[in-house]
Amino acid sequence: MKLPVISLFSGAMGLDLGLEAAGFETRVAVECDKYAAETIRKNRPSIPVLQTKIEDLTTKQILDAAGLKVGEAFLIVGGPSCQAFSTAGKRESFTDNRGTLFRHFLRIVNEARPQFFVMENVKGLLSAAIKHRPLNQRGPGFPILTWEEQLGSAFTIVTREIMGLGGYTTFDLLNSVDYGVPQKRERIVFIGSLHGLKIQFPKATHAKRPSVNELPWATLKDAFLEINDPNPRHINFPPNISKYIELISAGSNWRSLPEKLQAEAVGEGVYRSWGGRTGFLRRLSWENPSPALTTSPINKATLFAHPEKNRPLSIREYARIQQFPDNWIFEGPVSSQYKQIGNAVPVGLGKVIGQTILKAALKNEYVETSGLVVCSNKSLLNRLRNRNLTQLNPPGMSGISTPEDIEEWVQQSKEWLKNIEKPTLNLFEYLSEAA
């Protein structure tokens, strides 16, 4: 008998397909987007789909649809909407309703009492602030940051509320490419055991420069091996972008354009800010993994072109990178299909997560402290504890031109940071390292 899973924020089911491959069975899917819900029904007609906002559902409704009672679900999984924390968005955090959906995820976990839960989100959650202050309003001449405006304050709230579930939870920042996925895609993953079973994330199986026990990263060439896509379905670059893409070679970006075209191609602000944004106007390379897929392949700041053709990747190519089966059908208009695929957890990473949970269940090793949230990665934990609590505009963007002025500005910034308010419980200092 396969282990029953309740899937929340299911999307196109990338995580669920990975769990299926590890031996789990999705008993109900909760997904409010109509096209993603249609995708689930099309490919998995036996799975009940609750096409409703999670905040409008009771835990009993979800359990009833799954045919389960309290305590019978082995696993609850989900990725609460991440746009409020994404570095590609406005980062409005808890001021955006999407930033509080994790609380509904935790509500259902607390009431349904599964053996395990998995909550995943974007890397930006680690550095998100509860309240966002624009960059041009930070630094000397402006009020010091409150605790809510410090980087990481939102993550602090999330982890403290996970502690309230009891049991044992561990988290890590996983890069899909390190587990055989042909894509550099970092996600923060929490795995919790309400019964207090110890959980350990697996070591990477792939590397850019592999050791004896590792394999090389999978590449775009690997992802598209024997792909059957004779009439690729895709959207097109706008003409004002396409003319530059034609001049960019495989593996390069806007910086490879003739110098006289660079500022024109990306805009004067981007050209002069932060040393230049490398994510603008890229062309992929066959010999490297794909960058992280986004929900649209034509956004100027994150777009990339096919290695050889002057177009974005097709729907089927997008799906291959996320490791969806070739017979998986995505419903809705092309824009929605890109969104569904771009939001998904790569299938291979989902399988690794499932195997991690099964290993913990079989090992059956308990921890003594209830409500413990630990970090599986010592290096990550140290970075969280030691980093700056804010990000400031570079001196050149503040109208500072001389070396003396720049040095004075930097020193003022350092003193300013030293005097920031400290919360009763400092950011990240309450977290423990996994034993």
Image (tube, rainbow, N blue to C red):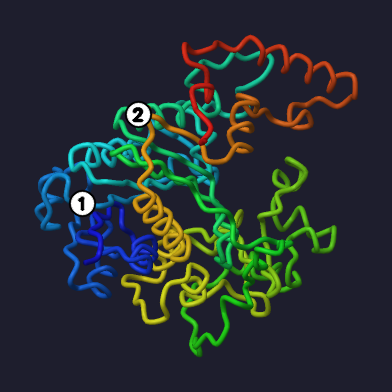
- Please indicate whether residue 301 sits to the left or right of residue 269 in the image: left
Q: Is residue 113 positioned above or below 288 on the image?
A: above
Image quarter where the N terminus lies is: bottom left
Disc 1, SS? loop
Q: Is residue 429 positioned above or below 193 on the image?
A: above
Q: Which of 122 and 303 is in front in this view?
A: 122
Q: How many labels does the image show?
A: 2
Q: Position of residue 309 (x, y in %)?
A: 64, 79
Crowd band around label 2 with a 10 angstrom C-alpha radius: few (<14), some (14–19), many (20+)? many
Question: Which mark identifies residue 417?
Answer: none
Of pointers 1 and 2, the one earlier in the residue sequence: 1
Q: Is residue 77 positioned above or below 49 on the image?
A: above
- Please indicate whether residue 364 sits to the left or right of residue 261 in the image: left
Q: What residue type is labelled 2?
A: Gly
Q: Where is residue 268 in the image (x, y as percent from the top left)?
A: 73, 47
Q: Name the residue under label 1.
A: 73
Q: Which amino acid does label 1 sit on?
A: Ala
Question: Which mark identifies residue 371?
Answer: 2
Crowd band around label 1 with a 10 angstrom C-alpha radius: few (<14), some (14–19), many (20+)? many
The residue positioned farthest toward the right in the image shown: 403
- Please indicate whether residue 259 sits to the left or right of residue 138 in the image: right
Residue sitting at x 62%, y 22% = 138
Q: Which of 350 and 129 is in front in this view?
A: 350
Look at the numbered discs 1 and 2 and tell me whether their residues touch, using CB distance below 8 Å: no
Distance from label 1 to label 2 (Cα)? 20 Å
